[in-house]
Amino acid sequence: MRVTSFNRKDVSSKPRPQKSFLREYGEALFIALILALFIRAFLMQAFSIPSGSMEPTLRVGDYLLVNKLSYGIRNPFSNKVWIPLGQPKRGDVMVFIFPQDPSKDFIKRVIGLPNDKVEIVNKEVYINGKLLETPQAVFDDATRIPGSQLTRDNYGPIVVPPDSYFVMGDNRDHSYDSRFWGFVPMDALRGKAVLVYFSWGGNHNDSVVHAFMGGLKGLVYHLSWNSKDFWVRWGRIGKLIH
């Protein structure tokens, strides 16, 4: 059988059809979107702080990066652990799904681990009978409320169930945490907070966009930035969370 030969140079020299600008831009955007969704689902996720329950460690207006690999690779839809990579340690600042309302994410500090006996006596926390020192904890209310009236200052003793955690805010007199609504199950964990990547101060009664526009308005009309509405806390950017 005869085979017809061809000139390789003739084939390679044919001009390749060029992609349109819109097609190239669309493909790049699609790849970036898939990559961003993958990072958010399995590696890192950004969160913001809307309340003062973790002050002074975290302040209203802080934006955080949370390491989602700290406590295992999880199903992005059910949050069930696929591959366990680690467990929370006492003192970790972690983000989790609020057990009483799955539409909300909370952030608190891990105080009690599974099977720990937790007791609070006049605001002091005891774990398995030993006083737990938490340097980040602050108190601004000298009143000590008896446990029969409220669980804020006196609580327990109670044993943390398996695969669950007892958490508290660092702003102890103003934190809605495990003292009031119970334990955080392992399947509710999002990840460990590691870094503040942005932080702003000003009018936190409004959104960051509206607050920024308020600051800009002062610059436009009075040639002076309105820091009452918005200003950047440069010293907090890049702060590691402990």
Image (cartoon, rainbow, N blue to C red):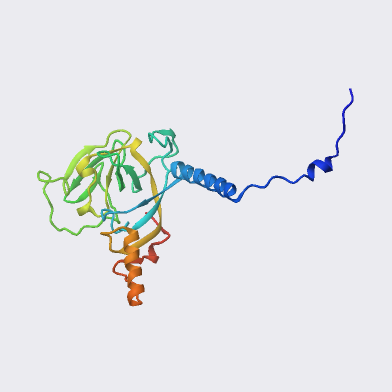
Quadrant for residue 221, please give it. bottom left
Quadrant for residue 104, please give it. top left
Q: Nearer the viewer, residue 105 or 216?
A: 216
In the picture, which quadrant includes the N terminus?
A: top right
In the displayed structure image, the side of residue 172 where residue 192 appears, left or right: right
In the picture, which quadrant includes the C terminus?
A: bottom left
Residue 160: image x %, image y %?
26, 37
Q: Nearer the viewer, residue 216 or 45?
A: 216
Quadrant for residue 208, please give it. bottom left
Number of numbered discs overlaid on the protein picture:
0
Residue lying at 60% horizontally and 51% vertically, measured from the top left: 21
As drawn, the residue found furthest toward the right would be: 2
Residue lying at 56% horizontally and 48% vertically, measured from the top left: 28
As drawn, the residue found furthest toward the bottom would be: 223
Residue 117: image x %, image y %?
25, 39
In the displayed structure image, the side of residue 134 where residue 141 appears, left or right: left
As drawn, the residue found furthest toward the top would be: 1
Residue lying at 21% horizontally and 41% vertically, measured from the top left: 181
Residue 14: image x %, image y %?
77, 44
Residue lying at 39% horizontally and 66% vertically, measured from the top left: 235
Q: Nearer the viewer, residue 108 or 38?
A: 38
In the displayed structure image, the side of residue 121 where residue 12 appears, left or right: right
